[in-house]
Image (cartoon, rainbow, N blue to C red):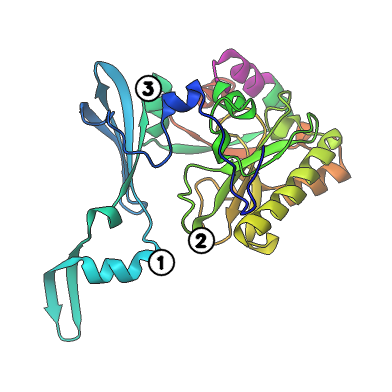
Amino acid sequence: MAESENGRAAKRPKTDADNERGDVGEVSSDSPVSDFEITRILRDCSREKNIFIHGKVKDQDAVVILEKTPIRQDTLSELLKSSQLKLEMKNDIYSTYQLQAPAHLNEIKTTVVCPATEKHVKKYLHQEVFLVEESGEDYRNITLPYISSQSFSVQWVHNILEKKAEADRIVFEDPDPDTGFVLLPDFKWDQKQLQDLYLIAIVHRRDVKSLRDLTSEHLPLLTNIRSKGEDTIQQQYGVPPSKLRVYLHYQPSYYHLHVHFTSLEYNAPGCGVERAHLLSDVIQNLKADSSYYHSRSLAFPLRADDGLLLRFKEAGKL
């Protein structure tokens, strides 16, 4: 993909896919939330300042996610000077206010999933979480058959790899069919502050679903992702490798191998020890034992409504 001298993706002619999803930054004339009828609140996270809502848009099931955007350092001066303050409490040197910011400094990131399937609704519904310990045998006898029996579509991933969608968001690509990948910002990152930097490397290969499929054969792929991913992030954003957390999820949220690059300052969802595996550790483990991830027991969290959890319970593993 061509890049301009300043490192940003060069513009390209519009395609049908572009027209369907609209231009980035364009004010939408057809709001998908103006006709949204609320059915129920799936999850309300005061700490993360987001809310997940289930409802309908024109008789189609939909999920709307509202999330307060981070306060940007480059707008602090304007925010403080142009906002109105409403006094709530004053006691000696302490006072608290409700700050009413101008509309352009008080944005709410809005994600719409429509039409939403039952799987989407369950994904965002608050659930109990259980820690499962999966042996290599469990993977082959329980997890893999379950994955194979489900319709986990990764067509949206193929659309990115084939430049049918999000091509303008790709910041780097290595086109090699065996060791290549595309690198693009995750939607969790607004690309305005480096403290919550978050990019995803998606491999071109389509025969590797997850960590469990990796052997020493894939070391060139993994080392290439680490090297070129870190170099690109340092060149594009000025963030050195020593300030990055580079890892894979297991279980992954979708079954096409991808690697997460996040700022160490960002407590990203899923970066805890029960799900994240540092890429550097994965590389070392495969160098020591080619079949390491084929045989090793791996722990991961599953929600109470996850079909895979039921399979483990039926097998007497929980």
Checking the image for residue 100, the label placed there is none
- Closer to the camera: disc 1 or disc 3? 1
Which residue is outermost to the bottom? 92
Near mark 2 (Cα within 10 A), the count class, few <14, some 14-19 or many ≥20, is some
Q: The N terminus lies in which quarter of the figure?
A: top right
**Magenta run includes residue 269:** no
- Closer to the camera: disc 2 or disc 3? 2
Circles 1 and 3 in contact, beta carbons < 8 Å: no
Front-lying residue, 80 or 271: 80
Which amino acid is tagged 2? Answer: Gln
Q: Which residues are magenta?
A: 141-154
Q: Magenta stretch mostly in which secondary structure?
A: helix
Distance Cα–Cα, label 1 vs label 3? 36 Å
Which amino acid is tagged 3? Answer: Ala
Compared across the picture, whether 318 is left or right of 33 comes to right
**Magenta run includes residue 153:** yes
Residue topped by disc 2:
195
Residue topped by disc 3:
116
Task: Kindly tell me whether residue 305 is visible in this rendering.
Answer: no
Front-lying residue, 159 or 315: 159
